[in-house]
Amino acid sequence: MSRDDPCAASPVRLGLAAARTNIVPAAIIAVVAIGVLAGYRHWPAFHDTLEVVRSWKERFGFGFSAVSTGIFGGFLPVLFRLIPRETRRDPQWRHLPFFVGFWACKGVEVDALYRFQAWLFGDSPAAEVVVAKVFVDQFLYVPFWAVPTMMGAYLWKDSRFRIARTVRRLGARWYRNRCLPLLLANWGVWTPAVAVIYNLPLSLQLPLQNLVLCLFVLLVMILTRAETPDDQARPPGQNSKASPRER
């Protein structure tokens, strides 16, 4: 395996590097999330505004989850990538239906997770309840389902929606080489965020999750950056032009 091989770099190093790169945004997210929670509890005007959002969530249910997550996870990140001059020709906007559709489905999935946990542990902000929910979220749902399906879907898109090419790019050590870096970066961003999310009432957990998601999707785009067409044609372990973090 050559030193230029993207898989030659330690997945742990890639994940920690991504986490370090996003340490300031992650800190900002944590502060914003805490601010939302504090505002909801102690600022009447802000509380009333969130109660409106809460009423929409309760009224439209999974439909609200699909639309809001499709916007925050799919539409807005692509829009933000078109703002800098150097990325205005980014072809990702052509995949906007994929991004919106994928994250709309994920929104329903995450909403179902939040509802299941509320049924299982209760909807109390008690410390033991929040800790249990964070554990299930970050150490069961995320490593065994959320990260693998997210990485696989984005690689499928980057492989021009061809299953054979996607499988070839994943390689034999797909979890170690592709998922582990994203998982480590995920924990750095999401663990403190979900701890705050689970302190909110059930109907407000998904809306706050959407705010955190918007930044995290940008991180996913970096980690799953597509290789050039020539590189895509090479078997795993033979790409000397691009790393898994470049797209």
Image (cartoon, grey):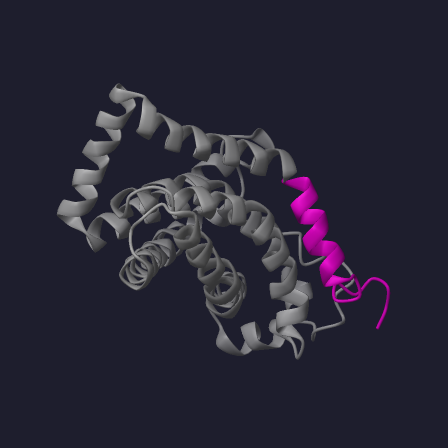
Q: Nearer the viewer, residue 201 or 53?
A: 201
Please tell me in which quadrant of the rendered image residue 170 appears.
Answer: bottom right
Q: Identify which residue is drawn at 57% across, 38% down.
A: 26
Residue 65 in sight here: yes
- In the image, taking residue 150 as reference, residue 16 lies left or right, namely right
- In the image, taking residue 97 as reference, residue 138 lies left or right, namely right
Q: How many marks?
A: 0
Q: Identify which residue is drawn at 64% across, 38% down.
A: 23
Residue at the limit of the structure toward the left, as seen here: 59
Q: Identify which residue is drawn at 22% across, 26% down.
A: 48
- In the image, taking residue 42 as reference, residue 194 lies left or right, namely right
Residue 78 in sight here: no
Q: Nearer the viewer, residue 239 or 211?
A: 211
Question: Where are the magenta residues, as a range?
Answer: 1-22
Q: Whole-percent x and y of residue 94?
A: 43, 50
Q: Whole-percent x and y of residue 159?
A: 54, 66
Looking at the image, is 109 positioned above or below residue 170?
above
The answer to if 11 sits in the magenta stretch is yes
Please tell me in which quadrant of the rendered image residue 46 appears.
Answer: top left
Q: Nearer the viewer, residue 71 or 240?
A: 71
Q: In the rendered image, which quarter contains the N terminus?
A: bottom right
Q: Whole-percent x and y of residue 123?
A: 29, 51
Q: Whole-percent x and y of residue 191?
A: 53, 49
Q: Identify which residue is drawn at 33% across, 54% down.
A: 107
Q: Nearer the viewer, residue 16 or 135?
A: 135
Looking at the image, is 124 positioned above or below residue 82?
below
The answer to if 72 sits in the magenta stretch is no
